[in-house]
Image: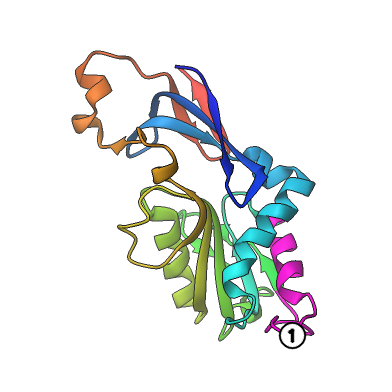
Amino acid sequence: MKNFTISLSKNPTIVMNVIPGHFTTSHFHLTHYLDLDNLKTNSSIARDVAAELALPYLSTTPIDTIVCMEGTEVIGAYMAEELLLEGTSAINSGGEIHVVTPMNNVNRQLTFQSNIQKLIDGKNIVVLVSSVSSGKTVESALECLSYYNGKVVGISALFNAFPDESEQEIHSLFTSEDIPEYKMLSPDECDMCKSGRKLDAIVMHGGYTRI
């Protein structure tokens, strides 16, 4: 099947590249790989993405810190700028917003360095992730922030695989509803495996490796 793109209806310059195939992660098999790299690394596109993601918070949500996961730091920085713009409805204008990224310790648990913890403790936090599929990334982030006494006031993502099943409200640009044939299945329930189709690639953080 050929690759295709999906544009955000509100802003056609924001485009998600979609690669159909038979992909595996450490837990699931996927029918599509979502290439979100250009949204995260192209500075002009990342600025547009940030403007869209900032909208739900502009007039309603005080924010002190944006915690960036999965390579979303460029978007996070632009998002902070958007939230701090002066305006009658911008609740954060004139304030300060810090953009930080957690670390993985030797046990693969998320942590914050000692000098960063003060930006989490008691602060209003937005969690920014690339995609929400199994929910494990968001779950790990929430556990970490709870440990450091952070107050999560919002979760934003470029893509949310299951918007109707998320326990927390997640503001996302794209969802699986934009890809009608998108499926995420456990390996023993994978239709492609049952039909004898071999895996095309292994999906890892930041990309995939063909098999």
- The image position of residue 136, as x and y in percent, is 39, 54
Is 57 positioned to the left or the right of 168 in the image?
A: right
| Residue range corresponding to the magenta coloring | 74-97
Residue 202 picture location, percent across and down: 44, 27
Q: Is 96 colored magenta in this rendering?
A: yes
Residue 52 appears left or right of 96: left
Label 1: how many Cα within 10 Å (few below 14, some 14–19, many 20+): few
Please tell me whether mark 1 sits on a helix, a strand or a loop. loop
As drawn, the residue found furthest toward the front would be 9
Quick check: is 193 in the magenta stretch? no
Q: Is residue 113 visible?
A: no
Which quadrant of the figure has residue 142?
A: bottom left
User: Within the image, what quadrant is residue 21 found in?
Assistant: top left
Q: Looking at the image, which residue is at 46% across and 59% down?
A: 109
Q: Nearer the viewer, residue 145 or 183?
A: 183
As shown in the figure, which amino acid type bears the numbered disc 1?
A: Thr
Is 89 above or below relative to 101?
below
Identify the residue shown where x is 62% and y is 76%. 117
Instruction: Check the image and report above or below for 61 versus 154.
Output: below
- 98 relative to 16 in the view: left or right: right
Name the one closer to the observer, 65 or 195. Answer: 195
In which quadrant of the rendered view does residue 211 lie? top left
Instruction: Tell me, yes or no, if residue 116 can be seen here.
Output: yes
Mark 1 = which residue?
88
